[in-house]
Image (cartoon, rainbow, N blue to C red):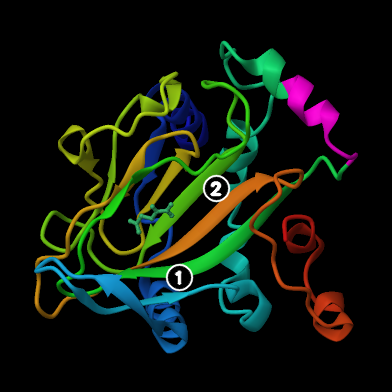
Amino acid sequence: MDIIDDAIAAIDRDGYAVIRRLVTGERLRRLQQDAEALLIPIEAKGVDGGSITGRMHKGTFGVSRAFDDIIIHPVLLDIVNGVLNPSRASEYPHDDELTKYITSLPPSDPGIICNIMIKDAAPREDIRSLHRDVRVPVPRPHQPIVCNSLLALDPFNDEVGATCVVPGSHKWESDAAPDMGDAIPVVMDPGDIVIFDGLLWHGHGPNYSFDRNRRCLNLNYHYRWIPYFRNPRLSDEVWRDLPQTLRAVV
Ligand SMILES: O=C(O)CCC(=O)C(=O)O
């Protein structure tokens, strides 16, 4: 068992895995700076009620080359390809319905695509409610079709709104949302990454601090046939210069 197999087994069993220190040192500092430069204000829910100014950046791949090497980080890609590999995944009760649904769709490239955005939990920002990232009309549970991940750019802990997960909930049949009290925080240092099955119930806790942002890169890998999350098209000039491994997943 190595780090990749361990992570794939944990995602299969618990719905999520954390890889420590995926990015470190100078590379991490540049990621923090590049993410900070792109974040734009949005309206968010405050812990004291009412709205506050939060921050986010969507469509990141279309405007920045600063994260390309992270999208194709070999450890991350090996884990994602393992999780989203139908012959490697365990059997789930509704795999047949999933196959039937996929064959009913117009033919599509069978590959995997990554959508990248930057997320923040701003000081005094309230929770992101628990949710699943998979919305296809197939009964649950079924094989993973979305493998989401959040690369911490700041410390993730109970004070600043860590991502929280309900372990094992990717195998639940019911789509009834669990209580926030059922979720546990994913405590991480900057450079750590949490990778999870899109069927796992997850969200983030409140950022109680007055002055600490909780930023992350959100890399969402999923099958191309899923009709959401599309990357903006790049100009031919930019596209030509991208490595083939990257072109295959964007
Ligand atoms: O920002 C977080 O910690 C949670 C993000 C999330 O819920 C998602 O990407 O679906």
Between 3 and 218, the one lying in front of the other is 218
Picture coordinates of residue 33, whole percent (x, y): 40, 85
User: Is label 1 or label 2 in front?
Assistant: 1
Instruction: State whether residue 232 is above or below residue 72.
Output: below
List the residue tagged with mark 2. Answer: 75
Q: SS of the residue at dot 2?
A: helix
Give the mark nearest the N terminus, 1 or 2.
2
Picture coordinates of residue 94, whole percent (x, y): 61, 15
Q: Residue at x 49, y 44 (%)?
A: 133
**Left or right: 66 in relation to 164:** right
Give the numbered dot on residue 186: none
Picture coordinates of residue 44, whole percent (x, y): 29, 72
Residue 106, magenta (yes or no): yes
Between 120 and 152, the one lying in front of the other is 120
Between 226 and 36, the one lying in front of the other is 226
Residue type at the position of mark 2: Val
